[in-house]
Amino acid sequence: MTCREARDRLSDYLDEGLNATLRRELEQHLDRCAACREEHRLLAATRQLLKTYGAVACPVDFTHLASRMPDRSAARGFSPGFRRPLMVAAAVLALAVGSWQWLRPALEPSRPDGVARQAPRVPFVSGRDVAEVEDLHRSFVVQQAVGTRGGLVLFAPEWVRDGGR
Amino acid sequence: MTEWRRLLPGVLAPALLLLAAGAGRADPIGLLRAAEDADRRLSYTGIQTLQAVRGRECTRRRVRVSHLRPDRTRIDYLTPAGGDVLLECGQRRWFYSQRRGSWWPIEWRSPRSYFPLMLQNYHVRHDGEDTLIGRRVIRLAITPRHPGNPSKKVWIDPGIKMVLREEFRDSRGRLIAASAFEQFELARRLSADMFEQPAASAEAPGPAPPPFTPLLPRYVPPGYQVVRREGLRRGRREGVYLRYTDGLGTISLFQFRTSPSSGPSDPSGRRDGKRGHGRFRSSGDHRPPSRQIGDLRCTAMGDVAEDELRKMLDSLPTMRTTENRP
């Protein structure tokens, strides 16, 4: 796993949203890469900090707005040496807020037979996206063996545990 | 004549009894077909255990099933994850994760029935009678016409024509999957609240179309035919998944596009050759047969002998690159 791939997956990792293989690969990478380990520590700390402030609403067009922000490289009032860490911190904070809001499950039924009435966004689980190809074959086998529902009963918890988001 | 009249009941009664006994077991195919349709006819509740085995690994679920005919089912997981719920409403399905505290729409497309195909390739015969959870059941054996394919046993309550137990075994007789009801009763009334659909705005998308035209093998083991093809994505790589069945047995053929830089890789998307994390990951170092054809990595898995899978792969046409193909 490269540093870029590792950093792309840090948010998922913190949300326990990676499947076992990716989790293991990422942890191995973190073991040997000090820079990514630091990135992980920083992201985890930022998220921990955010939790203490409660939920922060993230505008749906946040990315769009961010991309239209004018270039502030010539901003006055900050020395270059001071500006860079601040920008990194702001970027990490923005990433954390965005990831947090994006990944947080939107539906939270209070009881098994009760169903949330408001559903701004529902996480999606697809066996195709989550299971390894061998599991796909096994699900096909089991589906033939004990019926469609039987296969689903056996596999659905794995899908959600390994990759549901 | 008087003599004949006196003997008639004595002759007829055993004959009728034999006929009646035979009638109960005369049509195993009809009984199996009716059992396939049980969910449309019956509402019921029960506790069911399901398991899937591979090598030394066994996945087992114990669930409470509540079914409201024709197409609503609620599955409450009892073990290993109590509190989880699976909900089926027609063709839509959701999973409630107790740990995550949320509902998830799940893509799971019901296959069409392969019953006619199964009859072409398997024998269905009466195999005896048993008593299960206090019910008299008929045991049917489904055995392959072509060697090397799996077999199945099914226990059906002939009164309500409902499967109460089934076992699926490979050609060596090893258990692959099984299900059995520990408790079962017909339900006169089930609350509709139990099956209330989550207010999910997001729909699970259907299967992706193949990103390129897959290679089709010229050889397919006897009785098998392709029943499904769909697109796959493993990380940044795309591929096609072809499913073959003979009605009961299965063959999966994966074709992944490999870039020149990535080189041949295994279908789990790992270049180090390690197997995926799959719950049903095979034990040991055994790897399914693969072939590199042009820029496609083709891998076959299935219930048939490995020689058959290799023969299938060897029959794939050589090809030009898939890069610019539809």
Image: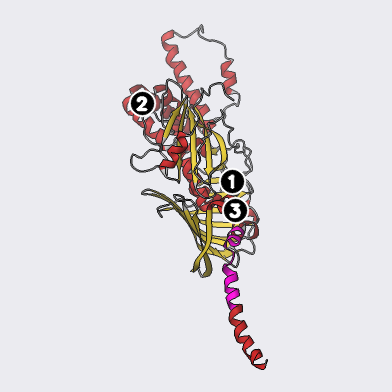
**Quadrant of the image occupied by residue B290:** top left
Residue carrying label 2: A37
**Quadrant of the image occupied by residue A83:** top left
Residue carrying label 1: B111
Of residues B184 and B135, the one drawn nearer to the viewer in this rendering: B135
Task: State the residue at coordinates (65%, 89%).
Answer: B4
Q: Earlier in the sequence, mark 1 or mark 3?
A: 3
Identify the element where label 3 is drawn.
Answer: strand
Marks 3 & 2, CB-CB < 8 Å contact? no
| Range of magenta residues | B17-33
Label 3 CA crowd tier, 10 Å (few <14, some 14–19, many 20+): many
Q: Amino acid at mark 3?
A: Thr
| Image coords of residue A39 (percent x, y) | 39, 24
Residue carrying label 3: B73
Q: How many marks?
A: 3
Q: Amino acid at mark 1?
A: Pro
| Residue B277 seen by the camera | yes
Of residues B193 and B147, the one drawn nearer to the viewer in this rendering: B147
The chain identifier of the residue carrying mark 3 reads B
The CA distance from mark 2 to mark 1 is 46 Å
| Residue B65 belongs to magenta span | no
Identify the element where label 1 is drawn.
Answer: loop
